[in-house]
Every structure is written in structure tokens, then in C-alpha cells.
Image: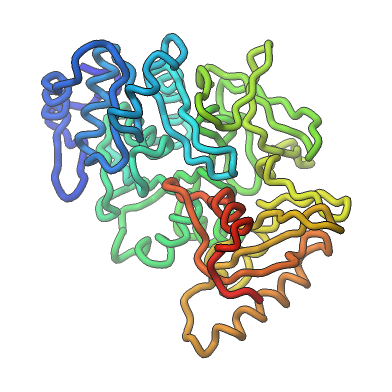
Amino acid sequence: MSEWLRGAPGAPALAFGGDVVRVGELAAAVAAASLPPGDGLIGCPAGMPPVLLITTVLAALERGRPVLVGGGSEEAAALDGRLPAGTALALRTSGSSGGGPAVVARTEESWLASAVPLAEITGIEASDRIAVTGPLHVSMHLYAALHALWAGASVGDGLRGASVVHATPTRLARLLGNELDAARAPDVRMAVVAGAAMSAPLREAAGARLHLVEYYGAAELSFVAVGRGDGLEPFAGAELELREAAAGRELWVRSPYLALGAIGGGMLRRDTAGFATVGDLAETAADGRLRVLGRGDAAITTAGATVLAEHVEAELSALPGVAATAVVGEPHELLGERVVAVVELSPAPASRRDAAKRAVVDAARARLEPAELPRRWFFGAVPRTDSGKVARGAVRAALAAGTLEGESA
């Protein structure tokens, strides 16, 4: 039986779309799975039914075949032979910061190595029912599902009956507003949150209802740091270094969880000492804990000042009436770049929309430093990747093409 399947044969393993598959049934399906002939890369396209995706991934790992998660057979054929030796999992990234999508290659052991530390940090055990809140072709959700199976727990897509939920901050905010109440999800005790930094208001609101475990990582790095509150500590087995860079101090990590490499784009850089980075900036607080500030390539240089897009987004997202934000830099003759904000307002009557926009702009003036204050505002839907991250690359492209949707103010 696969190293990821450790539950009792009669225990529930998967519960997607209302159908329950038990551990023994899943093990039998894995053993009987029909994979393409040969020893080449196997494709699991986005949109594949969750049970079939998990079955295919486990069957490929069991038989020593590399598997592409998030790409179909044609993409797998194009990548075959280009992946590093030892690749077991090829994971497509979203290219959220504009670096373009990449395929991250990693060994199975690099994910298995983090299973025990994550179980110890979260307390997840066989009696838990895990809910994943995003598509399984996204690496953080796929890992959450596999980790649940490794722990002997069951995993599915419904909140009712779940004890643990894995979510991005954006998804968690929506769940808190719509579904995570005592009537609809009475058994949910913990949220494991990743994918972006949580705002202070969201952390406070979620912490009043749930036990929170936040972690910072990336598809290329896997787990890097973990913590509760506004600060992180190194994930077990991870060595961290902050190194000076043009936009600030870059976070580098050395651990058994690192990917082998990335193909076709992405932000992964490595050094000869075994450390790697994706360009995220960080700082150390007075108490020694780590704060991740955001991606260095999201830094905006305006009038000689360096502005971090993620910081401005966090400040704007904390304002009343704001559902989501995206902040980018736009070339400008005098400033070098100017700060541009896309703001998605919370639902409100049309008659109050203009007043809501003015209130956001006025509150931003009081909250942000002059260099951070957006020079252009757009009010409309914020584009996102499959994993729920802000798609700044899409915002930049639409801005440059003059097709950015929304009402300017």
C-alpha cells in the first residue's frame, strides 16, 4: 500500500461530491489504476475529478512514474525528458506575481519528509475530517489532501462534519462570512492557512472562532516557516537566512523539502550551499520572529521610494467595505513608477457605491504613507489565480493594454 495511505481499510478516506471512498477501496483503485504505457510523465489535467486525480497520483507514485499535476497528456509529452532526474511530482504554478507559470519538479520524499512535522504542529490525527477549499491541481491543496491520508484521516470538499479546514486567507474570509458558523460547520476547530499573508482584522476574526495555524511556503520551497499571530518561526528542519537585495532582505531557506528545480519560468533561485529563494522579502521582529513582507518582484520604485505591493494591499484590505485588492506599479515619466490599486468592494446597494469608493480613498490617505498612496484607482473585480492568490501579472498586463476593467476614480 502507498506510503500516503495509512488509515484502517474500513475507514473513510475521500468524500468529494457526496461520495465516500474508504481506505481499502482507494488502495484497491490505486492498485488497479490503468496508467499510460511506458515510463514517461503522466498528465493529470486541471479539472480532473478529485477522486480520480488522487488515485492517479498515488498510482504513479506507487509505480515510480513521474506525474504532472495540473497539465494534460500533451503538456506531459512536451515536458518529458526535460525534468530533473528523480522527479516524482511535477506541479504547475500559477505565475501570480508575473514571473509566468512554471512546472516545479520535486521528489516524493521532499513531501513525505514534512508529514510528521506538520502533524505535530497541527495535531491532525486519524480521527479528523479534513476539508480542502480549493482545486487539487494546486499544490497546497493537493498536499493537504495527501497529508490527511498519511495521517489516517479523511479528506473532502465539504465543511459539514469537518474538523480542520485548509484555506487561503481570501477563501477563509469568505468562509467566515458565509459558512463557518456554528450552525453550518459546528465541528470545525482549526484552520490551516497559507498562500498569502493574513491581514490583522482577518486574523482577529478567525482567531475568535477557530484555532489558527499559519504557514509560509511556496510550491518551489514547500514549508518554510510556521506560526500563530503576526510572526513566524522556522518550520522544523528548515534553516533560514535573510540576505540583502535591491528591494530589501530576501528570505533564503535550506531544508529537505526543497524542489529539484523549476522549468518554464517561476522565481526559484539556488546557491551552491543548498539554499533557495523565490524572492520573497522578510524582516525579523524585536521578538525574533519572522515577518514575510512580500515578493521582491512586487516592489514598486516610485519617486525614489520602495513600496511593497503586499503591504499596501494588506492596508487597503483592512478598510471597511473592501473585499479584496491588487496593487501594481505602472511606468511613469517623472516618478519611475506610480502605484495603481484595483479595489473590489464588498456587496452594497448601487446607490451607495460612489460613497463607498470615496470612503476607501479618503481612508487610504489617512492610513498610508505618501509614497504608498495609489495615484490611480480602479474599482472592480480583482483577478485571481486558481489557488486564490492575487494575479498581479494579469493586472499589469491589462493595465498596459488599456483593458483593465472597473470604474476609475
Q: Can residue 109 be seen in this snapshot?
A: no
Q: Is residue 367 left or right of residue 12?
A: right
Q: Look at 57% across and 29% down and name the residue there.
A: 235
On screen, 88 above or below 346?
above
Query: Is the N terminus in the top left, top right, bottom left or bottom right quadrant?
Result: top left
Q: Nearer the viewer, residue 277 or 80?
A: 80
Residue at x 68% of width, y 11% of height: 272
Q: Position of residue 62 (x, y in %)?
A: 25, 15
Vertical relation: 385 (above or below) 340: above
Question: Looking at the figure, which quarter contains the C terminus?
Answer: bottom right
Q: Along the horizontal axis of the image, is 25 left or right of 43?
A: left
Classify 270 as above or below 138. Answer: above
Name the residue rendered at 14%, 23% in the picture. Answer: 33
Q: How many marks?
A: 0
Residue in view at x 12 percent, y 31 percent = 10
The image quadrant of residue 44 is top left
Is 31 displayed left or right of 137 in the figure? Answer: left
In which quadrant of the rendered view does residue 35 lie? top left
Residue 395 percent coordinates (x, y): 58, 55
Could you say which is closer to the camera, residue 21 or residue 160? 21
Extreme-bottom residue of the structure: 351
Residue 311 at x, y percent in the picture: 69, 53
Side of 245 where 223 appears, left or right: left
Whether residue 16 appears in this view of the structure is: yes
- Name the image colouring: rainbow
Q: Position of residue 288 (x, y in %)?
A: 74, 36
